Amino acid sequence: MSKVYKIGVIGGDGIGPEIIREGVKVLKSVSEVCNFKLEFIEYDFGGERYLKTGETLPDSAIEEFKKLDAIYLGAVGHPDVAPGILEKGILLKIRFELDQYINLRPVKLYPGVETPLKNKKPEDIDYVVVRENTEGLYCGIGGNFKKGTSDEIALQLSINTKKGVERCIKYAFELTKERNKKKTLTVVDKANVLTYEGDLWRRTAMELSKDYPDIKLDFAFVDATCMWMVKNPEWFDVIVTNNMFGDIITDLGAITQGGLGIAAGGNINPIGVSMFEPIHGSAPKYAGKNIACPLATISAGGMMLENLGEKEAAKLIEKSIIKALSEGYIKSLEAGKMGMTTSQVGDLIAKFVKEIK
Ligand code: IPM
Ligand code: MN
């Protein structure tokens, strides 16, 4: 009997529903040739629902999510909802409540894709950022004091626990070992200024490195890392960093791999329910036009299958994306410039996964 996976699908806002539809299309197609089944359970969480009901994501939904095999998310963010409400109320709530403590973001330039980095080729841009996903400045601890007066104070705390840092760096070491490429793990921090958290991260990395004698451990400051990601991306294999730095450097990484149209990520709980999403947002200006690039979402679907253990299916999706890009089927990753519609890109990849198999 073939395996059945229960996947929660949250289209969300803006272009979210359109791109997730194409992702689901590709996943269904690949499941048909790889002998497993996917059962999709759709949820309407997002800006529209919030505007109608005042609800972002009820606790009961979290309990339901715990029974799933994975979650597939489009995007959240609505022009009529104040910043922070949907992000914290839906996206961050899922990451935190399901303890998805790793945000895995590959930075990989595919053949046929243009990078803004001069003279860099696919073999130069192929690394993974392991972003801590449940702590740091994202913990939401802080507040305002004497708000609106000239004595106003705003406090935003960065929490770094030994447990949180350790499990994140350990994951990164394991990933470096599994990739078996440059065997280099770079810890990215700001240990020259943020000395307390920097010390915890560096000390923990050095302790763990004793268990990984074949892996070279490097340290780099986040500001310099931004420069090297542009100048010498070929130096990197696996980067591990805190939540805030990881957020910032992965947008930079995304543009070096051709843009947000292709960059995918996974919010991973290695022993629980993980969530996969494109790293771009809801792009309201492109919504409903069938012009947004669904490749980041399709690629996130591939990461989901990889994580579920369906390695062959994940490879088929990646190979199909590479074929579509390197053979010129898709002209650009920018919305409206792909030379085909969002749904045509989905059709194409759904067809390729079957042909390549
Ligand atoms: C991301 C996004 C989110 C983050 C926002 C929408 C809360 O920028 O996934 O990178 O900051 O983590
Ligand atoms: Mn971000």
Image: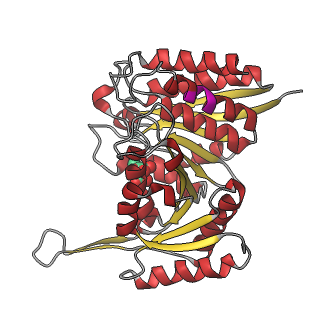
Q: Give the range drawn in magenta.
A: 318-322
User: Could you tell me how many numbered marks the image carries?
Assistant: 0
In the displayed image of the protein, which residue is found farthest to the right?
Answer: 1
Q: Is residue 30 visible?
A: yes
Identify the residue shown where x is 40% and y is 30%.
333
Residue 142 placement: quadrant: bottom left
Q: In this view, does 266 lie above or below 132?
A: above
Residue 337: image location, x then y, percent: 33, 22
Tell me, yes or no, whether the highlighted magenta stretch contains residue 321. Answer: yes
Residue 86: image location, x then y, percent: 39, 45
Identify the residue shown where x is 14% and y is 79%.
151
In the displayed image of the protein, which residue is found farthest to the left?
Answer: 150
Q: Can residue 88 be seen in this view?
A: no
Residue 25: image location, x then y, percent: 59, 21
Q: Is residue 2 left or right of residue 88?
A: right
Q: From the image, which quarter does the C terminus lie in?
A: top right
Identify the residue shown where x is 40% and y is 46%.
256
Q: In this view, does 114 lie to the left or right of 215?
A: left
Q: Is residue 7 above or below residue 123?
A: above
Q: In this view, does 251 lie to the left or right of 135?
A: left
Q: In this view, does 86 lie to the left or right of 25?
A: left
Q: Majority secondary structure of the magenta segment?
A: helix
In the displayed image of the protein, which residue is found farthest to the front?
Answer: 119
Tell me, yes or no, whether the highlighted magenta stretch contains residue 296. Answer: no
Residue 276: image location, x then y, percent: 57, 42
